[in-house]
Image: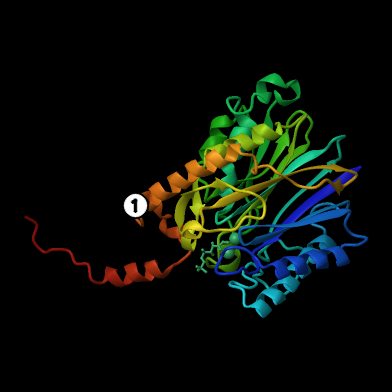
Amino acid sequence: MKVTLSVIKADIGSIGGHIAPSRRLMETVRSHVHRHGEGLLIDSAISHTGDDVAILMTHTRGPGDVEIHRLAWDSFRMGTAVAREEGLYGAGQDLLKDAFTGNVHGLGPAVAELEFEERPGESFLFFAADKTDPGAYNLPLFLGFCDPMNTPGLMLAPQMSQGFRFVIMDVAHTGGDRVIELEAPDALYDIAALLRDTERYVVESVWSRATGEQAAAVSTSRLHNIAGKYTGKDDPVMLVRVQRDFPATGEILAPYSIGPFVAGCMRGSHQMPLMPVRLNAGISYFDGPPVISCAAYSMREGRLTEALDAFAHPFWDTVRDRVASKAMDMRRQGFFGAAMLPMAELEYTGIVEKLRALEDRFHVRANHR
Ligand code: F6R
Ligand code: MG
Ligand code: MG
């Protein structure tokens, strides 16, 4: 059976700043999806990571389907109305356009979709990150799909030994999707050369070379490219199919023990380490740290099992402690050097005006000694 997995997420308002949505907001989104998804969806699951609400849906209508996207858009609109009623902070923040125009691409919400012939025991991971942008997945995907030090399956499993094809997007290009396809392991160094620049080049999808099947889909929206200015970090979602022709669950999860520095956190303008957290976690220290959650699922004919919380295991408590120390170390240097993002990635542009005003006060000394 051919199934589509669609996850659409948006930040539509949260309690006490950018922490987490209210219970009533979540219930409103959930009940709208249930009521209006009848006859359209096979199954759905609503969750939040930090202040972002995600609607995970299974159906048979293929990626980019108008009705599926409309359902998510309308659910977020309903949730936004509640956010306004309750006085939540940033109500409707990610709904950047007023009218629905066929699908949510370019309207603000983030989307990741996968269509596949369901395997027996089909298993996948749903990742959601808050207070960061899609480049946060570059390193974990590189290690998970390219590096035998992380993924022994590349050596041990014959069906993986041909490697994987990466579709990488240039997210700085605003006149349409500018993409490149590169295959690992042949083009490993080219892939690495692009993926090191997380603000510009972002993995959009990963495909098995052996079967042509899609393994991963990442949301690539950059909100500031849509709005023309920074309106918040992009807080990307990702779907990854695991086992058999694809890396094992543990091979995909392992790179998150690194806690790599990513863009995000306070005022969307800092570099902070990415912390793996439990499902439905909120945000705290320094409007962060940037967090990532992972729900593991299996499915049968599009019906989802309950979500298993992949980062709830005690192992990740040690990782969280290490990431917290790393975060505090970085914060010790405040605004200095690598702690803050480069000018073009700052969410607040007030500093640009400040520097412009100071420009006039510079002068070149007449006499050199
Ligand atoms: C992402 C997010 C942040 C904020 C940023 C600035 O979910 O909430 O990227 O957009 O922290 O927020 P303000 O300007 O409201 O403090
Ligand atoms: Mg927010
Ligand atoms: Mg968010």
Report crowding for label 1: few under 14, some 14 to 19, many 20 or more residues within 10 A (C-alpha): few
**In the rendering, at what x and y percent does residue 109 appear?**
68, 62
**In the rendering, at what x and y percent does residue 336 appear?**
33, 54
324 above or below 119?
Answer: below
Residue at x 19% of width, y 67% of height = 363
Amino acid type indicated by mark 1: Gln
148 above or below 278?
Answer: above
**In the rendering, at what x and y percent does residue 253 appear?**
64, 37
Asked if the beta carbon under badge 1 is closer than 8 A to the nearest atom of ligand 1, the reply is: no
Residue at x 60% of width, y 58% of height = 282
Q: Is residue 183 visible?
A: no
Give the left or right position of residue 31, taking residue 148 as reference.
right
In what quadrant of the picture does the C terminus appear?
A: bottom left
Spot the residue most to the bottom: 85
Residue toward you, 79 or 115 = 79
Quadrant position of residue 32? bottom right
Residue at x 52% of width, y 58% of height = 284
Spot the residue most to the left: 369
Residue toward you, 291 or 60 = 291
Q: Is residue 314 visible?
A: yes
How many marks the image carries: the answer is 1
Give the left or right position of residue 269, taking residue 79 as reference.
left
In what quadrant of the picture does the N terminus appear?
A: top right
Spot the residue most to the front: 314
3 above or below 355?
Answer: above
Q: At numbered mark 1, what does the secondary structure look like: helix, strand or loop? A: loop
Residue toward you, 149 or 84 = 84
Residue position for label 1: 333
Colour scheme employed for the rendering of this structure: rainbow
**In the rendering, at what x and y percent does residue 38 appear?**
91, 62
